[in-house]
Each structure stands twice: as structure tokens, then as C-alpha cells.
Image (tube, grey):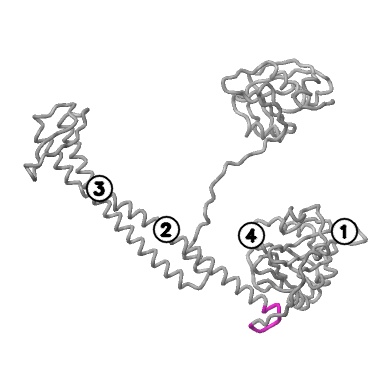
Amino acid sequence: MSLNWLEINEILAEIPIEGSFLREFHQPDHHSLVFELYNRSDKFKLFISLDNRNCRLHLLEKKLSNPRTLPRFAAFLRAHLKCGKVKECSQVGAERIVKFSITKGSPSEQGERQYLLWIRLWGGAANVIVTDINNLILDCFFRRPGKGEITGGYYNPAEELKERRPKKEYSIRPLPGAGTFNEKIEAFYFALARDQQLRELKDAIAQALQDRENRLLASIERLARKKEEYERFEQFKIQGDLITSNLHALRKGSKWLHTLSFEDPEREIEIELNPTLTPAQNAEWYYEKFRKAKRGNLRVEQEINELKQSLKEIEKKRLLAVNQESPEKLKMLFPIRPKQQRKQDKVLSVPGLTYYSAGFRILVGRTAQENDTLLRKFVRGNDYWLHLRDYPGAYVFIKSRAGKSLPLETLLDGANLALFYSKGRKSGSGDVYYTKVKYLRRVKHDRIGLVIPTQEKNLFVKLDQARLERLKGSDLTY
């Protein structure tokens, strides 16, 4: 339930925004902003909510908590608009768009800078956009590339309004309570937000309790099936007794025992034997199954009773949550953890340049940072490292292939790249030394990416333009 344009107009009429200075900016959550303003006679806070269910702006008396880390857009506002003066505050026609004209700086010093801040309170399209006086977007609360609402884009409300449907008839809602319209709006929407939060908390708690109950019921069902198996434990003892009484008639390697039942001497039964065990060992095996099943039956009964007690506790918690009317107490009683999303392997983009030679992949780091990142995250011990001797330049890595030796032509390709992407390129030739990555030793407490090679070999190369063009796929000049 967002504000309509008449209500926005009524709210702005009560706030002395024009002529006030922007003292501070806060961003309590991912859909709201707080502007602290002051003028000669007063200081006040302006609350802006971009929640698509309750888009609004009004004076703020309630104290809100702020995140420890300053969010991106609030940091932008502090850097560019803090201490700025609101020259003009107006509503764009009969629309839910508010325009702030802000100046910062002194004309006599470094020059007066002018900004436009647009607050668009359009449900699902709500946003706060900062532009220069030519409508070039400097930053937005919500960056929406599909709509062009990104840094470097243009924002012109007049073009937006051409596509709007005909306006409905609106009126200012009668709100309960005493005080100014701003005070009524603040009380109404924060009470509404509290009710929404309470409903969402109760729904989340109910779902969490239901999931827990379903898991307990499934465990009880599984244990009940196991209990049925364990309750037949007496038969294992009888089978062991029958084998013991027929030890004289059995031999190692027998697979079955055919004998008469103790309960019914006229009924013949058969007992499966393990041919790798002796008759006495087979009897002991059945006795052990008897003892294990007897112990397991007692343990399963105990576990089932404990799970049933847990079900009773869940029912008590469910009633407690239903009757609780305080979101704060609900959070304390039921600290629900957010659902853990499945961790997906992060696909890291390889820094620097990538070439291919005879099926081998060649990575080139052009800066110290790229060299260090490649060395830390993208190469292994058996990969080859190349670098031009006596000159600063790129680290070139040739990725090894399982069961393949490194061809000379690929080594020469890598050496040419090491020479080309170095300070010694103008000489046209140089000594390139190479070794495996596992023979590099990183230098602690020194320049980033600095290494000391061991077991290195030397390769003298001349810059080969044709070779470089083949690798690059285009002409390279040096």
C-alpha cells in the first residue's frame, strides 16, 4: 500500500526541505534510506522506503539500526552530497516522483557543483537516482541495466511519463491517531511493517517446525521397521541351538542344515550356513546375531520414545509461536537460521592473456598483480614458468599436460611472449630463463609477485614477429 501523489504532496508541504543542508545519510536495510537534514531553525530526518509494498517518504522519529558496513549507495551519497544544500524540492506534476535540486561547494572557491536527486515511488519500479544537471546518471540505489538506470545512463522523467497510463482519481486517506500527517503516516506504516514482519516470522517458524516434525516422523517410521526386524531375535538363538545340536552331522563347507524343529518335531526346517566357517563358528555367528538384535531392540525402543517426546515439544512450540504477538520475542524464542544455499564452485576469470600452442595453454601476466594471482591460483607445480632475465616484465606460464612432454616450439612461443611483454622488448632479443613452478620460491615481505627461481635453464631468443602473429591472431608491433 504505497503513497499516492496527493499524500506525497501533503507530506512535503509539512517538511521544510528547501534551504536545508544534507548532514548525513544512512541505509538501514536493502530498500530504505534516511537523510539527516538541518536548517537555521530545526534538524530532522527524512525516511525513504523503496519497498514495493510500502513505497513512501516521511519524517522519521523512530530510531533505526544501521549495518556495520556502509552500503554502496549510502557511501556514494556521503561522498558527493554530504553538506550539500537543497535549493529546491518539488513533486513532478501529479506523479509520485520527487525532485531535489542540490548545490555543493562555493562559487568563489573550487566552483559550485549541482546535482539532481530523483525519488521515484512507483511500487515495483521505485528508485533513488542521482544525476548531474544534464540528467547524466551518477549512481542509483537500484542499478537496472535493462532500463538504463546505471552510471553513465540518462534519466529523464518526462520521457517516462509519456508511457504512463491515464491517472486514476486519488484522495488523501483518513488515518487513525493524532498529530501531523507525517506522524500519522510514520505510525501507520511502521505498525503495518511490524504486522507484516510478525506474519512472516510466524510463517517461517511454522514451516521450520513442520519440517522438523516431518523429519521426526520419518525417523520413527524407519525405526519401527527396524524394530520389527529386531523382534524376531529369538529365532536366531533357536537356529544357533539347532546348529549346535547337529555339530556331529556337519562339516566345514556345508551350505544348508536340514533338521527337525524343536517346537514341532514333525516339521523339517532348513538353516543357511556360511561354507567358509566351521559348524561351531556358524552356530556362534547366529548367537551373535541374537545378542545384537536383542540389544538393538532395546535401543530402538528408547530412540522411538525420545523422538515421540520431541514431537510433543514441537507441538508446545507451535502453540507458543501462534500466541506470541511480539516480533522481538519471537526472534529470541525461535532464532531461525537462514537456509544455506548450495555452494557452487566459483568460476574465476583468468587474469592477463591466454594463448594456445600445440595444444598447450600459455598464460601471461602483464602486471605484478596479475603475475601474483596467476602464480597463486591458476598454475601447479609441474607447469613451466618463463621470465626475461635482467628486465622487469611478464611472468609466462605454460600449463603442463598429463603424459605429454613440452615441445621445443611451444617453449620458444612462451619465450617470445616473455620477451615481448617485458621492458627488454626494444632490444629484440634476450635471455629467457625457465623452470617448473614447484622450483620457485616466493620472497616474503617484498614486492608482490617477486620469486626466486631454482634449477632454472637459459634460453636465448630473438623476437619472432611471425611467431607472435600466429599466437595472437593479429599483427603485433613493438
Of pointers 3 and 1, the one earlier in the residue sequence: 1
- State if disc 1 and disc 3 touch (CB < 8 Å): no
| Region in magenta | 176-184
Of pointers 1 and 4, the one earlier in the residue sequence: 4
For residue 450, above or below residue 216: above
Q: Tell which tag, 2 or 3, sits nearer the viewer.
A: 3
Q: Which residue is mark 1?
A: 134
Quick check: is 170 in the magenta stretch? no
Can residue 452 be seen from the camera position used here? no
**Relative image position of residue 334 (x, y in whole percent):** 47, 63
Question: Where on the picture, by quarter, is residue 120?
Answer: bottom right
**Relative image position of residue 55 (x, y in whole percent):** 69, 68
Q: Tell me, for residue 212, which label it has, or none.
A: 2
Q: Tell which tag, 3 or 1, sits nearer the viewer.
A: 3
For this orientation, the residue located farthest to the bottom is 178
Q: Quadrant of the N terminus?
A: bottom right
Per the image, label 2 sits on a secondary structure element best described as helix
Bin the neighbour count of mark 4 within 10 Å (Cα to Cα): few under 14, some 14-19, many 20 and up.
few
What distance separates the C-alpha of mark 2 from that of mark 3? 26 Å
- State if disc 2 and disc 1 touch (CB < 8 Å): no
Q: What amino acid is labelled 3 in the image?
A: Glu
For residue 363, above or below residue 130: above
Answer left or right for 111 relative to 280.
right
Q: Which residue is mark 4?
A: 67
Q: What amino acid is labelled 2 in the image?
A: Arg
Q: Nearer the viewer, residue 280 or 102?
A: 280
Per the image, label 4 sits on a secondary structure element best described as loop
